[in-house]
Amino acid sequence: MKILLTGGAGYIGSHTVVALIEAGFQPIVLDNFSNSHPAVLERLARIVGQTVPLEHVDVLDTPWLQDVLRRHRPAGVVHFAGDKAVGESVAQPLKYFHNNIGGAVSLLRAMEAMHAETPEDAPTLVFSSSATVYGDPARVPITEDFPRSHTNPYGHSKLVIEDMLYALMAARPAWRVGVLRYFNPVGAHPSGLIGEDPAGIPNNLMPYVAQVAVGQRDHLNVFGNDYPTPDGTGVRDFIHVQDLAAGHVAAIKALLGRGESFTVNLGTGRGHSVLEVVRAFEKASGRAVPYRIAPRRAGDVAQCWADPGLALRLLGWRAKHALDDMCTDAWRWQSGNPNGYRG
Ligand code: NAD
Ligand code: UFG
């Protein structure tokens, strides 16, 4: 069964390619490489022992998408493609509304047109949403029925896409849609061949810590140590990207099997503080991670972790990896590929 992965060359997409192949699916990667490198396809081939088909296409190009769907007739689509840097979204909101919301509209219209041509195929979609749709949560753990809000254009784009999907599901009962709200994906494939390869200065904690440990940056800035958390630093639900990839396989199987749409959190249900991550990374890497306490980062929340119970009940999925595994695998990737896919 073919599964089309828009943004499949990216961080989460590439790990999901491997998990889908291991589960017996045939993934097809669709990407414009705006935030990824074609070398990921060679790495994937080394891991899975086969060439992964690539469609070098922009999701904004609806006619091309339709052509791809017509040629492959995938049983499902996973929509990863989009921009994801919170700070950049504040500086360049139109880029985010155009690529994220425009990209989703383009894909949905292509899928709708395909459905008109082949009504026997139920449109089946998994969408990469984010815990960012919970804004500043009133309490933790977060369940899916918490109120949603946004604090930046990136988060706003995810919220709008969710709403578009809910409207579409109401209007078109044939559609099967899985909305996955990821918490904080980190780590890498245990082979050390694929991982997170941020362009420029990393915005996120784990890749920054990894670059400090490997000696590319001299220290980490810890954004605030006066939060109402046990050690004063921010607390997040870090989830191994391998667990996240498995969550996509479970979501696709549920949609193709039972056929009911759903919205679920993909998190571990545990929070770890910034300083806990630093210590775990030092242990995993055997390197020091010097840090300085810096002012809070605008827009950060004190703590955020999931109640992952619904994903277990609906998909039979739960995260298996602990923080030490996440750091060990992130370190293997970082130390083996200090310049990411650029050699
Ligand atoms: P990523 O940037 O590594 O992957 C996204 C991929 O989409 C890249 O390969 C990029 O080249 C591609 N892309 C972007 N715009 C495109 C377009 N117009 N046409 C075709 N391809 C395009 O990001 P990721 O971390 O793998 O995230 C995947 C998805 O998950 C994103 O939608 C992101 O918002 C969401 N998400 C990520 C996180 C996280 O912390 N990584 C958390 C929550 C949600
Ligand atoms: N942090 C630092 N120093 C850094 C980077 C981060 O102290 O250099 C701290 C942050 O202040 C926060 C924690 O580390 O307390 C985690 O920060 P990240 O940037 O790694 O992750 P966020 O929780 O802020 O956001 C991430 C993604 C969002 C997504 C959200 C929920 O960037 O897109 O997870 O899924 F919406």
Image: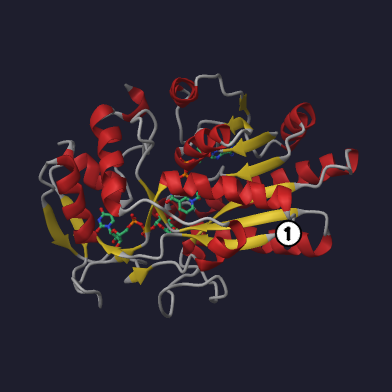
The residue shown at (42%, 45%) is: 241
Instruction: Specify whether residue 301 is in view.
Output: no
Compared with 169, 257 (above or below) is above
The image shows a total of numbered marks equal to 1
For label 1, the SS is loop
Q: Quadrant of residue 177?
A: bottom right
Instruction: Specify whether residue 300 is in view.
Output: yes
Q: Quadrant of residue 27?
A: top right
Residue 221 place in picture, x, y as percent = 19, 55
The residue shown at (29%, 28%) is: 337
The residue shown at (53%, 76%) is: 146
Q: Is residue 165 left or right of residue 202?
A: right
Q: Quadrant of the C terminus?
A: top left
Q: Is residue 16 left or right of residue 102?
A: left
Q: Quadrant of the N terminus?
A: top right
Compared with 38, 117 (above or below) is below
Determine crowd level at label 1: few under 14, some 14-19, many 20+ residues with C-alpha closer than 10 A: some
| Amino acid at circle 1 | Glu
Can you identify the residue that label 1 sits on? 260
Q: Nearer the viewer, residue 305 or 109?
A: 305
The residue shown at (88%, 39%) is: 118
Residue 301 place in picture, x, y as percent = 35, 70
Q: Quadrant of residue 172?
A: bottom right
